[in-house]
Image (tube, rainbow, N blue to C red):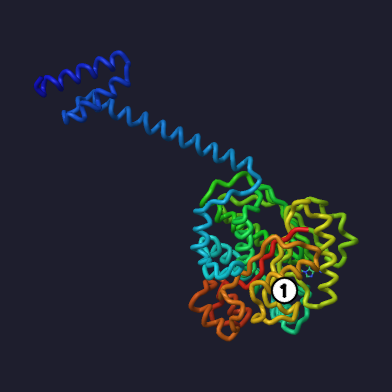
């Protein structure tokens, strides 16, 4: 058969198959026509396009089915699944490096997540502080500073001055949010972050731990399907002004997001030293996590008393399989046991952490030391040069740092904390 005849015969067979609605046969003949190199007739081209559409449609349906399965699995699982792409992304952005088994260096930040919050806080503080008349503003600010700087003389601050929450927001808040973000990332990496979660934050300040978690979940949203989250966050704090200011900022922060992470807040304004009087106001055996972040007293008598009360809190309010989550600055931890950083080697460090937990009747689950410098013995004098070349700068807060702390140089996000997960 010559080519013209062969082409005509195939086209005839193709049309016949179509008229009998035998699409399978038509597809096979179309393949033959395509391999012969013959030009396609109008009908053959239409059929070819139609077949492509059918295939795409099938693929989409399959993908949709797969997504539904993933969503269903997520909804049924109690814990957020470990997604390697997310872990890699966060590790890259925060420049996280493992120096030793339990020592992690972190020198980066995710600006997409942190800059908007920083801008909200600086805007909030500017408006709030400008609304206070002079000389009252300067006088109150000085009182708050004096209270806070008691720390340098080994005195625990009271945080009771009118401007203590503002000072805290200026000086420590964002750095502590940065630290708690990393702490939640650590919990997540171990597969211990539930999608329905109840947190009791002891000595919560403006709600630092809730902010850290919310920012971390914002990162998750960008890389994975989040199941329906239910986050119940209870702040146990003696200064209601801290709770109030924290909530004012939260409203602005939540408003700025297209899909805010749903948090259900409860505010318990209580002094932990009066826990015995107030314990019935806190839900029993309810919390997945009891968090104590940066509230370990310098005064020995207070610290011992607080440890006993913390122990009662864990016993009464933690779920049977719940976790205790402690965040403490390295220098503070070493000082409690009269140790110098040079004395801390791996096994000594673990014994130290266990000793610390023992005082609260806890068992170690896991811990890491996160440090910007990656070293336990970095000298304070050299820190600024290091920070200048390696650490992320504050952006919107710069003017406030200058105006209210009198600091003309840039300040940087830094971390130097033990993050400890424990159980009763
Ligand atoms: C250093 S701040 C830590 C705040 C927050 N947890 C963080 O990591 O950013 C200490 C907080 O503990 C609170 N606090 C101090 N003594 C307390 C007590 N006896 N009872 C309850 N809260 C207390 C202070 O009011 C302050 O908000």
* Residue occupying the far right of the picture: 277
405, 219: nearer the viewer:
219
Count of numbered labels shown in the rendering: 1
* Residue occupying the far bottom of the picture: 381
* Residue occupying the far front of the picture: 347
Is residue 74 rendered to the left or right of residue 41?
A: right
Point 64% across, 58% down: residue? 187
Q: Looking at the rendering, in which quadrant would you find the C terminus?
A: bottom right
Other residues around mark 1 within 10 Å, as few (<14) / some (14–19) / many (≥20):
many
Point 30% across, 13% down: residue? 20
Is residue 53 rendered to the left or right of residue 303?
A: left
* Residue occupying the far top of the picture: 20
Secondary structure of residue under mark 1: loop
Where is 25 relative to 385, above or below?
A: above
**Within the image, what quadrant is residue 404 found in?**
bottom right
Regarding residue 17, the answer to whether it shows in the image is yes
71, 361: nearer the viewer:
361
Point 76% across, 70% down: residue? 355
Regarding residue 131, the answer to whether it shows in the image is no
Task: Pinpoint residue 38: horizontal percent, then vertical percent.
Answer: 16, 28
Where is 93 relative to 192, above or below?
A: below
Point 75% across, 84% down: residue? 153
Task: Pinpoint residue 251: horizontal percent, then vertical percent.
Answer: 65, 57
Where is 377 relative to 185, above or below?
A: below
Residue occupied by mark 1: 163
Task: Pinpoint residue 132: horizontal percent, then vertical percent.
Answer: 69, 73
- Which of the four quarters of the rendered structure image does ligand 1 lie in? bottom right
Task: Pinpoint residue 356: horizontal percent, then vertical percent.
Answer: 76, 70
């Amino acid at each position: 058969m010559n080519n013209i005849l062969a082409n005509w015969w195939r086209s005839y067979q193709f049309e016949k198959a179509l008229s009998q609605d035998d699409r399978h046969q038509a597809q096979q003949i179309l393949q033959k026509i395509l391999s012969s190199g013959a030009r396609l007739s109008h009908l053959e081209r239409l059929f070819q396009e139609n077949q492509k559409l059918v295939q795409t449609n099938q693929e989409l349906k399959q993908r949709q089915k797969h997504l539904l399965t993933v969503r269903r699995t997520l909804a049924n699982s109690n814990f957020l699944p470990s997604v390697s792409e997310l872990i890699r992304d966060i590790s890259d952005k925060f420049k996280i490096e493992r120096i030793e088994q339990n020592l992690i260096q972190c020198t980066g930040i995710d600006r997409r997540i942190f800059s908007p919050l920083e801008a909200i806080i600086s805007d909030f503080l500017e408006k709030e502080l400008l609304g206070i008349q002079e000389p009252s503003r300067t006088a109150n600010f000085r009182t708050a500073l004096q209270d806070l700087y008691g720390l340098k003389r080994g005195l625990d601050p009271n945080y009771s001055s009118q401007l203590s929450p503002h000072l805290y927001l200026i000086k420590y808040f964002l750095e502590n949010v940065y630290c708690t973000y990393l702490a939640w990332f650590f919990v997540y990496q171990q597969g211990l972050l539930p999608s329905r979660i109840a947190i009791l934050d002891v000595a919560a300040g403006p709600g630092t731990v809730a902010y850290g978690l919310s920012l971390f979940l914002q990162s998750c949203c960008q890389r994975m399907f989040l199941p329906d989250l239910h986050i119940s966050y209870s702040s146990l704090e003696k200064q209601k002004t801290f709770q109030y200011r924290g909530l004012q900022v939260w409203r602005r922060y939540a408003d700025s997001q297209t899909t805010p992470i749903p948090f259900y807040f409860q505010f318990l304004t209580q002094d932990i030293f009066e826990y015995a009087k107030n314990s019935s106001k806190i839900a029993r055996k309810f919390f997945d996590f009891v968090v104590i972040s940066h509230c370990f007293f310098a005064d020995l008598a207070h610290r011992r008393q607080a440890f006993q009360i913390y122990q009662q809190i864990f016993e009464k309010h933690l779920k049977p399989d719940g976790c205790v989550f402690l965040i403490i600055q390295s220098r503070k931890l070493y000082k409690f046991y009269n140790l110098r950083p040079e004395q801390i080697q791996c096994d000594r460090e673990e014994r130290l952490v266990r000793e610390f937990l023992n005082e609260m009747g806890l068992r170690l689950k896991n811990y890491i030391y996160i440090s910007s410098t990656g070293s336990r013995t970095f000298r304070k004098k050299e820190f600024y040069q290091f920070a200048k070349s390696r650490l992320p700068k504050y952006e919107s807060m710069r003017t406030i740092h200058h105006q209210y702390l009198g600091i003309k140089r840039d300040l940087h996000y830094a971390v130097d904390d033990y993050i400890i997960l424990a159980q009763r």
